[in-house]
Image: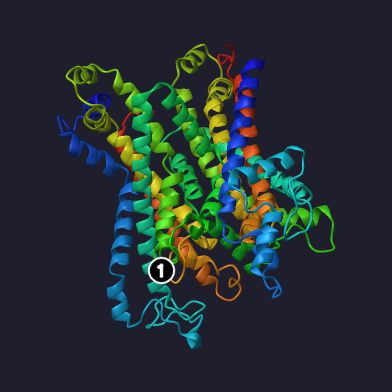
Amino acid sequence: MKAEALGQLAAAARSPALPGAPPGRLLLRRFVRHRLAVASGMVLLLLALCSLVAPLIAAWLGHDPNAVDLLGRFAGPSSAHPLGTDELGRDLLLRLLYGGQVSLFVGLVGALAAALLGTVVGLVAGYAGGRTDALLMRLTDAVIALPLLPLLIVLAAIDLGKLGVPAAVAHSESASLYRILLIIALVGWTTVARLVRGATLSVRERDYVRAAVALGARPLRIMVRHVLPNVVSPLIVATTLSVGNVILTESVLSFLGLGIQPPLPSWGNMLTNAQELIWQAPALAIYPGLLIFVTVIAFNFLGDGLQDALDPRAEEP
Amino acid sequence: MLRYFAHRLIEAAIVLLLMSFCIYGLIGLMPGDPIDLMLSGDPNVTSEDIARLKALHGLDQPLYERYWHWFKDAAQGDFGYSRTHARPVLDILLPRLGNTCLLMGISLVLAFAVALPAGVLAALRPRSWYDYLLNLFAFAGISVPSFWLALLLILLFAVELGWLPAGGVQTVGVDRFGDRAAHLVLPVLTLTVLTAGGLLRFVRAAMIEALRQDYVRTALAKGLSPLGVVVGHALRNAMIPVVTVLALNFGALFSGALIVETMFAYQGMGKLIYDSIMGNDFNVALVGLLFATLLTLVSNLGADAVYAWLDPRISYEG
């Protein structure tokens, strides 16, 4: 926190309009300066809101997102179907909104789960040091370098029955959701682990940590009370940036038919049939992908803006 | 230097060995079973026959014994047969490997050709309008879903304009250079866009950092031409982090290639791995994944060598 406070102080000194502004407001001001990030935040809020009220919109339009209407396939936009219908005659707008629920949920929860795992790995590696550290960091490097997608495809294709998972659980509707979250947590933790390890290493030798150790504080307490507060801001940035990646991973796997399983819609699996239908119904190929793109780029801008706001040293030319 | 690389080589071999065991175990967990697949649809087989066949092929043995058998054969260059192609695995894999290397190589060179000058340009004037614009492009490149970009390009160039083929390696029965090149354009374009965005951001960040260094100021103060300083001093040093990132991103590049190959029906290794996983072709999937891992390890070693060449301060002694 110290270096950061100094950075903020320096920044405050440079902008005379803000004598002694409190750090909170300073942060907000610096964030607001990043207009794209602010706009991105609004877009994301809007998307989340629309997804959340999807049931209301469904009730208003008067149909179910999974209602098949084989006579009304590939319909163009109309008042009943604002964006038209898909290859089974289902309402495209409703499926996009319900898909948004799934994609955003997977993105946020997956990124948080991965960050949690990464934090634990990083804390253990940084605090334990020595062989544990070397081994964990080798593992991290290996996971970063490996061609992950083919391995993810294998993981997503595994027959849970062979692992002893009861068939009722393995084939339930939400199984694909939990499986994808687990897979994402398993591969997404590396950036956070490195960050947290680095911070732990630098904090470990500080005087206040030594004092805490001398006072008999347990490792867990030291990690939570002294180390974690030092990594909060880079952690927030890394997690925000990883939400985008998680959504991309989910969409690729779902697109390949290995992620979220229909009839549960996700932006990725809505595109599964798009390639064969591209000559008949190009709109089906455009909307879900556009939403993925907008969401991911918004999360990336948001993360970039947060980084600028939280770490003023990074971007000063 | 030699000792260092020998050490790294041994390490890479251990990683490869560990990976082969993990992948072998994972593949065994996939749905289906070689014997079941072989016999599905044959009404004359009893369950005793199945048990006998499994014993004959060693499928009743524990995982580590089966792996050891596979490993002994693999060590002698026998990777088994493909179930769907009914040919030895390597006969199928090696031509695909060439196609993938071609795709990745061209895309990487093009991505570099775009990202290097663009990144340097953006770093020279941070927060200028063109820095803003280039950043926008870079963010778009890292945020676009690979398969959707491929779909859009197919929609534009193959469906709407009809300029380029929507997929494949070559037109059946035609074996001309121009035809093969036309089939490469869209896959290469997709993979280049996917790669160039991230690369641009890394070049920009590394250049901003390098331009801040004292030796740059010294060189400028001595009266060297700004262009010479940017290229000769800053860029050369900025390349060190860029090369690291590039090596670390090899896995991502391969993942991108897998999607691109699948979307454009380009007969490369990524598509082969995907098809073999989906088609329960266990031998091919296993060896394909191992080759992908091997490529990654080799690229990492290569990056280390380039490192030593770029930065004389790095020595691998001791």
The quadrant of the image that shows the N terminus of chain B is top right
Using residue B318 as the reference point, say whether residue B45 is left or right of it.
right
Residue that lies at the very extreme toward the front in this rendered image? B48
Position of residue A179 measured from the top left corner of the image (x, y, whole percent)? 43, 56
Q: Is residue A155 above or below residue A24?
A: below
**Nearer to us in this view, B165 or B172:** B172
Residue at 66%, 39% (x, y): give it: B109
Q: Is residue A141 above or below residue A188?
A: above
Using residue B86 as the reference point, say whether residue A117 is left or right of it.
left
Using residue B56 as the reference point, say whether residue B115 is left or right of it.
left
Q: Is residue A1 above or below residue A175?
A: above
User: According to the image, label 1 marks what residue?
Assistant: A96
Position of residue B9 measured from the top left corner of the image (x, y, whole percent)? 64, 26
Q: Quadrant of residue B267?
A: bottom right
Q: What element carries label 1?
A: helix
Position of residue A26 measured from the top left corner of the image (x, y, whole percent)? 21, 36
Q: In which quarter of the image is residue B179?
A: bottom right
Three-letter amino acid code at the position of disc 1: Leu
The chain to which mark 1 is attached is: A
Q: In which quarter of the image is residue B112?
A: top right
Q: In this view, does B118 lie above or below B54?
A: above
Task: Tell me if I can see residue B306 in this picture.
Answer: no
Position of residue A59 measured from the top left corner of the image (x, y, whole percent)? 29, 79
Task: Tell me if I can see residue B84 in this picture.
Answer: yes
